[in-house]
Image (cartoon, coloured by chain):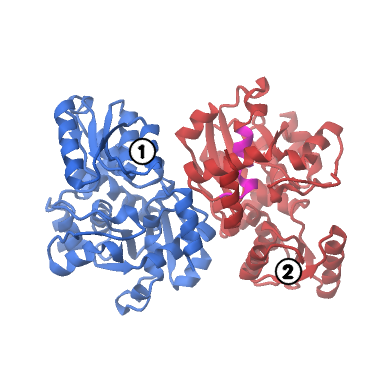
Chain colours: A blue, B red
Amino acid sequence: MEEKKQITKGKYAANISSIMEANLRIKPHVLRTPVLTSTSLNAMSGRQLHFKCECLQKCGAFKFRGACNAVFSLHDEEAAKGVITHSSGNHAAALSLAAKLRGIPAFIVVPKTAPTCKVDNVMRYGGHVIFSEDTIKSREETAARVQQETGGILIPSSNDGRIMSGQGTISLEFLEQVPQLDTLVVPISGGGMISGVALAAKSINPAIRILAAEPKGADDAAQSKAAGRIIRLPETNTIADGLKAFLGDCTWPVVRDLVDDVIIVEDSEILKAMKLCFQILKVVVEPSGAIGLAAVLSDSFQKNPAWKDCNNIGIVVSGGNVDLGVLWDSLNKAI
Amino acid sequence: MEEKKQITKGKYAANISSIMEANLRIKPHVLRTPVLTSTSLNAMSGRQLHFKCECLQKCGAFKFRGACNAVFSLHDEEAAKGVITHSSGNHAAALSLAAKLRGIPAFIVVPKTAPTCKVDNVMRYGGHVIFSEDTIKSREETAARVQQETGGILIPSSNDGRIMSGQGTISLEFLEQVPQLDTLVVPISGGGMISGVALAAKSINPAIRILAAEPKGADDAAQSKAAGRIIRLPETNTIADGLKAFLGDCTWPVVRDLVDDVIIVEDSEILKAMKLCFQILKVVVEPSGAIGLAAVLSDSFQKNPAWKDCNNIGIVVSGGNVDLGVLWDSLNKAI
């Protein structure tokens, strides 16, 4: 109860109220994603697994929740000038569609080297693409220039209360769909999703466990938790291209306080989990989307006595935007 | 109303009552499959499309509904001796799982030439595999022998009132999930699904249109409708391996009376639709599962003035059991 009070007191960039407001705001636009189960995967893991399929969300990823919340929470005069972000991934496409639904422009700064399919996605949803060099510096500078030229509002992909609140709506749905969940396993990258999910879930059920799933080649969150401060890695190396971002000042305090542990998995485990999602759940997942299942099947989870009482596990399958070629390679590499 | 009366009068092997009974019977076991929508696919088709994702059903296909209904409607003494079928596909796996859930044996006659993955599926669910030669005659003879030896009950894959009633539960869910549906597009093979779906849907809404989707290389249903009697083809040739069966004496009368038209599609259209399901809906579908979308996007549908008022179209995505290699080849062949 002490913790619950803290959560609602405004200690963090989002809280249960902002998440419930987000829920009302985005409900007309987002899909209440289905929860899938599989007796085969239950048998493999020795637990009851419940898969919240955000890969079936509009734009193919949970990112649409946060983007929608940010776009629809702007005042009319703010909104009119449009929204801006620098991202080539799911957030960019999600922001483009959310802006399109509101009838405002979206300016998306994309590194020249971004895969064509991602640029195509942004354009399909009506986003205006502005190319930058492939460095954080160039992306930020280009975004700043666009902001100056258009007067638009910058919407970060993770480190933002509106984004965190939007992603937190996953918990509201999930705990309504499967009230007996005792554990949530959530991919971690910039921390926008897991912080929103943790804030909402622990407000509803303070005893619920929140476990982050992180690839070994980008384990900054695990390192940050160990160090007690945000660690940014000089480089990252993982097949889960959606999980390479670092925590920020809005997301870190929640991750620090409310995430019970970080489970680190190898890329080979992610590939194996992608294959299982494809073969058994029949959903298309990107590597980041499969990491929750990978975590639950991993030795680090299975052999850790701390998690032996995790019986009803909710796994957020974060997204399904994967190139056919990547999927094919991944599935063939998986043992 | 005249028609509605006929449907409930027992003219057919199933009716709205047997379908509602099936619904109660199988509810604890089957998944209420989600309905997905996509603004992109709506734009492509010029209609509101609603996809009932039976590929996400237990066993990866709608077949589990009928199998479950058949198995759980047996009396204890009948059931004890087990169930038998000759099929290497989704029905075999579905019957094995249904039997396993009831705690009775399932004997599955499989042609020696069946793909390993299909045999594996049956065994994964605990079915006893008995091999036959790859002819209808050998399959039927082997099944008859197994029946004599075990005293088990033969459960056909389509031509059976219990099966039709189980598949009909799709309509009950679908029309509850999307009450405004004015058209249903359903793959046709042995007719077990479409007959159940048509009986239930037309009982609820006599004005709803029922369109069958059939591959050109196995267009026996279209030929049967044209001839006014069951036509069996000397051979079939289509990538949609789940759609090669012929109508039977239970399913044909319903198809004759209640299916408004058969839309014939080319394999190339099926491949294209598979790719769209993968890329946009993010679900894994087998060729048969994609044929409904293929039909709605086809010229035969789009240019037919009879269907210009079909605005809210429900498409049954029948199954997702596809070998990785087949999917990969298909997606690469699709233009």
Type of amino acid at the residue the image marks with label 1: Val
Using the numbered discs, state the Cα–Cα distance from disc 2 to disc 1 in whole angstroms: 57 Å
Q: Residue A119 shows which numbered tag? A: 1
Q: How many marks?
A: 2
Q: Residue at x 76, y 71 (%)?
A: B130
Q: Residue at x 86, y 34 (%)?
A: B228
Left or right: where does residue A225 sit relative to residue A319? left
Depth check: give the residue in front, A142 or B117: A142
The numbered mark 1 sits on a residue in which chain?
A
Label 2: which secondary element: helix
Left or right: where does residue B198 sit relative to residue A192? right
Provide residue A124's location: percent of width, then percent of height.
Answer: 40, 33
Q: Residue B79 shows which numbered tag? A: 2
Left or right: where does residue B309 sit relative to residue B246? left
Type of amino acid at the residue the image marks with label 2: Ala
Crowding near pointer 2: few (<14 within 10 Å), some, many (20+)? many
Magenta span has B295?
yes
Report if residue A212 is visible in the image: no
Q: Does B162 appear above or below B204?
A: below
Magenta-colored segment: predominant secondary structure: helix
The reply to whether dot 2 and dot 1 touch (C-beta < 8 Å) is: no
Provide residue B197's location: percent of width, then percent of height.
Answer: 67, 42
Label 1: which secondary element: helix
Q: Quadrant of residue B131?
A: bottom right
Image quadrant where one finds the C terminus of chain B = top right
Question: Do discs 2 and 1 share a chain?
Answer: no
Outermost residue on the top side: it is B305
